[in-house]
Each structure stands twice: as C-alpha cells, then as structure tokens.
Image (cartoon, helix red, strand yellow):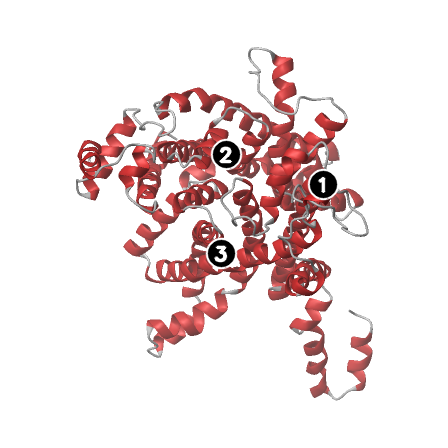
Amino acid sequence: MSKYILRRLIQTLPVIFFMSIIVFGLTFLIPGDPVVAILGPDTARTMESLEVARKELGLDQPLPIQYFNWLGKALQGDLGRSTRNKHPVSESLVQRLPVSIELAVVSIVIAAIIALPLGILAAIRVNSRWDLTASLISVVGLAIPNFWLGILMIWLFAVQLKWLPASGYTSIFEDPIAGLRHMIMPALALGGGASAGLMRHVRSSLLEVLRDDYVRTARAKGLRERRVLVRHALKNSLIPVVTVMGLTLGGLMGGSLIVESIFLVPGVGSLLVTAIFHRDFPVIQAGAMVLAMFVILINLGVDLLYAFLDPRIRYQ
Amino acid sequence: MPSSTPASATNKAPGAVAVVPQARTGIWFRVRHNRQMIIGLVCVGTFALLALLAPIIAKDPAALDLMNDLLPPSSEAPFGTDELGRDQFSRIVYGGRVSLQVAMLAVGIGLIFGVPVGLIAGFYGKRIDNVTMRIMDGLQAFPAVLLAIVIASVLGSGLTNAMIAIGIVSIPGFARLMRGQTLQIKETDYVMAARAVGARNSHIIFRHILPNGIAPIIVAAAVSSAGAILTEASLSFVGLGARPPTPSWGGMLQTGYPYLSTAIWLSMFPGVAIAVTTLGLNFLGDGLRDVLDPKLRRGRN
C-alpha cells in the first residue's frame, strides 16, 4: 500500500504543476497591461510609476523566472493583495475556505441520502415503476441549473412559506440549529443536482454486481435475498460509487460559486464572484488555485481510499 | 419489430431475405423507433425553430415600456413583462438564439482542438501522449464551471469570450475520449492490415481511426452542448455572458432575481427554457448512443 501511495503522490505532482501554470498564465490573458491588472485600475498611473511597479513586481523578468518567483511566494502563503481593499488574499481564503468545505460536505451528504436509496431501489427492481421514477428524477435533475433550483427554493421556502431564512450563514459548530437552517437550502441546491448523476452510478454499479457469479453463488447457497443484497452485492457495488462521490464533491466546488452568492454564504465561491464583478485579478487567480488544489487533493484521497477498499487496484 | 419478418421471409426467394433486415435496422428506422431520440429532437427542435422564426413570432426584445413593467402573464404578454416592461416571451425566444449559438460554437471549439489532440496523443503515444495528457489533467483539475468563469472573467465579459471560455473547458473531455478510441482502434486487425500494405500514418488516421472512432464523440458533443448551455447560464448570471440588452436566459434570471417575491414569472420561465433545452440535448445524446451503436444497447439491457 505504501508503494501505491507514493506512486499516486508522484503522479499528482505534474497535475499540480500544470494547474499552477494555467493559473499563472491567466494574468497574460488579461487585455492590457498586467501591472495595471495587478495594482488595480484606481492606481495613479504615470509611465514612470508603472515602470517602478513593474520592477517591484518582477514583471520585467523572463517568464520562467516570473513563474518560479510567483510559485515560491504562493508556497509561502503569499498570494498577493486584493486590488479592491488591499487585504492579503491568503487571509480571506483561510477565513472562507472552511465555510465552503462545510457547504460541500453537507451537500454531498444530501446527495448521497437522495441517490443511494433511489439508485438501489432502481437496480433491485429494474424496469419497474421505481426504476422509471428514479431515472426520470435523475434526467430532470441533470438538466436543472443548480442556481435556478436555489432561486425556486428561496421563493417557496423563504418567500411563500417563510419556513427558512432566505440567505445568510451561521456556523454549524456554533449554533447547530441556526446553522442547519441556513445551510439546508444552499446544500439542497448543490446536492440535489449532484444526486442525479450519483443515482445513475449507484444503479448501474449495483446492476453490474448483481449479474456477477458470486451473487449467483450466494443465492444458490440459499441465502435470503436481503442478505445477498446487503452482504454481497451492495458492499462491492458501492466501491466505485465512492470514486464518483469524490468527483462529484470536486464538481460541487464549481457550482458553489453561484449558489454561495445567491444565498450569501461567505465562502470562497462568493468571494470569487465578488472579485469577478470588480475585476479583482489577484483574488480570482488565488481563489481558482485554492479550489483546484482542493479538487486535486480530493481526487488523490479518493484514489487512495479506493485502493484501500479494493486491494486489486494497488497491483495494477 | 418482430411480427412480420419470419412470415414474409419464408415467402420470398432466399436472396431477398437480406433486404428485410436492412430496412428494419437502417439508421432512420432506429431514429424513428427511439423514444429518447424523439423527445430530444422535439425539445431541441422547438427552441431551434423558435430561435429561427424569432423576428416573425416575437416582438422587439429590447423594446422598453416602463408603463407596463412587471406585469404577470396575460394574453398580451404570455410570459409577463420584466422590470423595464420588456415582453418576456420575446426575450426568451431571442435568448434561445444566444444559447443555441453558444452551444454550437463552444462545442465546435472543443471538437476542433480536442479531437486532433486526442488523435495525435493516442496515435503517436510516448512523450507526446504524456505531455499533452498531463496538460489536459491540469485543465481538468478545475471544476468546469469554475474554469469557464475564471477564463471569461479574465478575457472580459461578452458573448464571444464566454464561448471561448466554455470551449476551452470542453477540450480535455473530447481529447481524452478521442485518445481512448484511437488507442483501441490502433490495435485492430484492419489497421494492422493497412500498415502491412504500407499505408501512411495520415491515411490510417483519416481513413480508419477517425471514421471508426467518431460515434462516441458525436454523442459526447450532444451532451456537451447541454453542459455548454448550463455553463453559459451560469456565466450570464454573474454578468460574464452576453452584454445587455442582448437577452440571455442566465442574464434574465439574474435581473429577475431581485423581484423574486413580487414577480416570480421572471425567475420561472427562463429557468424552464434552460431546463427543457438541456433535457432535450441530454435525451438526444442518449438516443444517439443507441442509434449509432446498437451493440452498446444490447449489452446494456
């Protein structure tokens, strides 16, 4: 196992490298002078002051050196300053990342709560009414934009029924009830959409396992269907589902941008959207990198978990 | 499908038998008898037709009428009017033009770059494969919506930039798929045979690998257009898509959002339009999968 972990860690490095190059390269896609983009549009600009700033920021250096300077600073936690309020970007990220992670975790739990029973039911009763209902839900779920789902929920649960607060955030750890009341709608908006894809995977994975020889053997031994299902089929079919859940969790980080800003959740997503409205490039750059980093780490964790659950993977 | 075949086959000369299955397994037969395909075609076709006929059936989507703002749906304005008194039905019809345009051009960008990258990486292998696929890994490390939003925000708002951003994000998916196809087809007997008679690489790539490996790409293109429409809606919602007054479904949701408690129709109809189009494209993709590869279908059931 340790050999596998090492190999997997080494495989992750080039992905992080190319990801960081993409993030670094974003600065050069900005139309106009990168110095202006980094300092913000309000900075007084004379030709001389721009040249001084260019030297200070190291933008007069060759590109590879610029990249390694930037990377070195990033690794030390210096991600630049917001052009809007001059706050160090890393501070805002440290403050906001836990909120986004909390939202993502609650969302994936909700997605699993919806997807597992429906997917399992659909697989056990293939081509039944349950199967049809489940596939209908998943097809519709895949087509609905998550932020629209969020808007509709706000209208129904906050405006019409007045059951839940329309927006805002309270930490679940400080006040569990208020925290959940704030979290439930954004998490449903994100997790509801994610459950659609997950459900399909649960169904197809279980269907595949149910055709396997060892399930037939278990049935031939005279085991009760319930036991065959729980002990033999489900246990094995859920292993690939773990991978899909990891990928889904990563995808949620993308959806969190708009859902967080609709529900005014103070996470990385809403930080990014605010930065986009103000063309605050250092924040956009750092926020994108942190979210991508998070996704890469999740994928790594999922792969390791997968190898732990299914030893065959380690030896391939 | 079964009933008539055996009876009619026995009455005919042995040579004619082959004709019957041909008529019943041809691609149009399969299209007509695929329910998903038909639902998909109807959903997408409706919006395509509306978009095409927009100047005839819709009013000017930018015509302001401040006396009649925020009117609920009526016979005069079937989907109501927005905060500036513009007819929402007309805006949705014209917004369909934007969405379909984005879907086609963004997926086009993904295909134009992704397919050759996948072909070259898969065919030549070794270092080229390694480097290009790691770059694709790097691109895929970002959640698609996030990367599209970031690229679009850097390029600046506007429809063209949004399409470029969504297109770039869809490149790795196509590249990966085409690479997998190439790796598989490269090892088939007919490619070996072509090599044995001295066919050039370009001949093998264009005459053998591309035509035989394209079916899953077509399916993926349909599904990606659905994704492109969703992503464009997200971009427009954060103000990075089509610039006003050009109507786009995501943008309409954004401007309608502040009126949620008083004018729910502003938040309802554009969302329905997005959902129906995306649903249709997903169905179309599923249907195409069955139609283009009947083997897959049999394996699945």
Q: Position of residue A301 (x, y in %)?
A: 44, 31
Image point (71%, 39%), residue name: A219
Kindly identify which residue carries mark 3: B106
The chain letter for the residue carrying disc 1 is B
Amino acid beneath label 1: Leu
Q: Nearer the viewer, mark 1 or mark 2?
A: 1
The amino acid type, in three-letter code, at marker 3 is Ala
- Residue A189, above or below B247: above
Q: Quadrant of the N terminus of chain A?
A: top left
Instruction: Confirm whether circles 1 and 3 share one chain.
Output: yes
Q: Nearer the viewer, residue A183 or B97?
A: B97
The quadrant of the picture occupied by the C terminus of chain A is top left
Of residues B160 and A208, which is closer to you in this image? B160
The circle drawn on residue A253 is 2
Mark nearer the viewer, 2 or 3 = 3
What chain does mark 2 sit on?
A
Q: Is residue B208 left or right of residue B272?
A: left
Q: Residues within 10 Å of mark 3 (few under 14, many from 20)?
A: many
- Which type of secondary structure does the marked residue at label 1 adopt? loop
Relative depth, front residue between B196 and B275: B275
Q: Amino acid at mark 2?
A: Met
- Number of the label disc, if any, that sits on residue B70: 1
Q: Residue at x 60, y 64 (%)?
A: B293
Alpha carbon distance from label 1 to label 3: 34 Å
